[in-house]
Amino acid sequence: MRFNNIDICSEYDHELTDMIRIESSHIIDMYLRLLKYYENAHCKKLNISCNEKAVHPCISSRRNGYIRLHMPFCPNRFSSLSPSQKSLFYLDLINSSILYLGMQWDWNLSYFTGIHRSILASNFKNQWIHGKPSPSPDRHKQACLKIVQTIDEAVVFLIITQDRKVTKKITVTTAEPVFWIYRQYLGQIRWIDSSRLKITGKAGEILFEACGL
């Protein structure tokens, strides 16, 4: 089975779970983009439960590859952390959780520690191209959407290239660094002519328009 999904929640506090999911979104997003997937015999999705009563890691459920892992957690200490410290907390929580599972199931732990190091080296900056570049009708230009995600924000850029050189970089939107918030702008690029295009959603609605390209 392919391990390619992670969720972090609070065991006892629904409001804290909502906050954790928002605050950890950019770390999970970055981690999974580097991970892509990991073939194994045990885990499809890792559900990490921050449990203030736990004194050591403990698996409570492993149904059909959906693992629920309880990890020790101190709410009082957590609440005083700065945004950058919380990002490090979530990254370390994911890393320690996977190392715990991996030691039991003989995973390639160096692969996961490499992901951990890469995220630290990037200072939690996550950037990638959404989908495939879209060529203009005359084939002289290409357009793509680039996402730059940090601790504080996610910026979606429209990038225009010609002869492999960037000729335009236009901000489509700036949003919270939470995937389900900014993904609404990750539509399909449709050229109108060689100087105009629009970005459309799944239902064909226009999300963004640009001209003079």
Image (cartoon, rainbow, N blue to C red):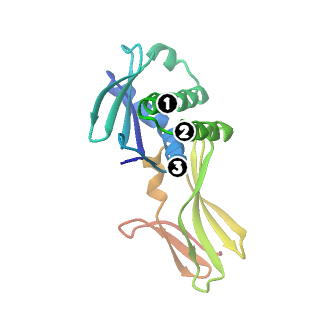
Q: Please state if 94 lies on the left or on the right of 155 as rendered.
A: left
Quarter of the rendering containing residue 47:
top left
Vertical comparison of 147 with 29: above or below = below
The answer to whether mark 1 and mark 2 are in CB contact below 8 A is yes
Label drawn at residue 99: 1
Query: Residue beneath label 2, please?
Result: 112
Q: Residue at x 54, y 32 (%)?
A: 91
Kind of residue sitting beneath label 1: Leu
Q: Secondary structure at mark 3?
A: helix
Chain-order first, disc 1 or disc 3 = 3
Chain-order first, disc 1 or disc 2 = 1
Kind of residue sitting beneath label 2: Phe
- Label 3 Cα neighbours within 10 Å, binned few <14 / some 14-19 / many ≥20: some
Chain-order first, disc 2 or disc 3 = 3
Kind of residue sitting beneath label 3: Arg
Disc 1/disc 2 C-alpha distance (Å):
8 Å
Evaluate whether residue 89 shows in this view: yes
Query: Residue beneath label 3, please?
Result: 33
